Image: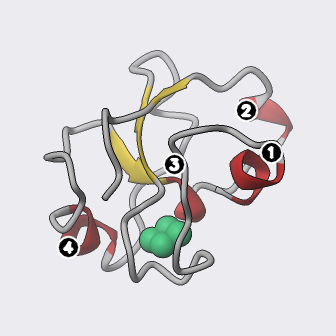
Amino acid sequence: MHVAVANGVEGIIGECGGSMMCATCHCFVDSEWIARAGSRKDGETDMLECAAVAPRSTSRLSCQVRLNEEMDGLIVHLPEMQI
Ligand code: FES
């Protein structure tokens, strides 16, 4: 989320600043990348239920995805709306 917001990626809002309180950073991790994105954090699934668009099995709160070198080239898809 921080990288997306800092680089002006439209569709990632990050209203709560990454404290997992808003779900405006919802994204769908491409199925080819889901294993490298790691698993959801405690409470993440509950917050995803509050997202503007229904979550899928590949849904993540992008503020909870920690990037590393293995994720260079990560593909995520964005929901049609965040709020
Ligand atoms: S920025 Fe609010 S939940 Fe991710």
What residue would you read off at disc 2? 71
Which image quarter: residue 9? top right
The disc, 4 or 3, on the residue closer to the chain's N-terminal end is: 3
For this rendering, which residue is in front, 55 or 5? 5
Q: How far apart, in angstroms, are the residues tagged by discs 2 and 1?
A: 5 Å
- The amino acid sitting under disc 3 is Gly
The disc, 4 or 1, on the residue closer to the chain's N-terminal end is: 4
The disc, 2 or 3, on the residue closer to the chain's N-terminal end is: 3
Q: How was this image coloured?
A: secondary structure
77 left or right, relative to 63:
left
What residue would you read off at disc 4? 46
What residue would you read off at disc 3? 38
- The amino acid sitting under disc 2 is Met
Q: Mark 4: give few (<14), some (14-19) or many (20+) Cα within 10 Å.
A: few
Q: How far apart, in angstroms, are the residues tagged by discs 4 and 3?
A: 17 Å
Q: How far apart, in angstroms, are the residues tagged by discs 3 and 1?
A: 11 Å
Quarter in which the C terminus is drawn: bottom left
Q: How far apart, in angstroms, are the residues tagged by discs 2 and 4?
A: 25 Å
Which image quarter: residue 56? top left
Q: Mark 2: give few (<14), some (14-19) or many (20+) Cα within 10 Å.
A: few
What residue would you read off at disc 1? 68
User: Badges 2 and 1: C-beta atoms under 8 Å apart?
Assistant: yes
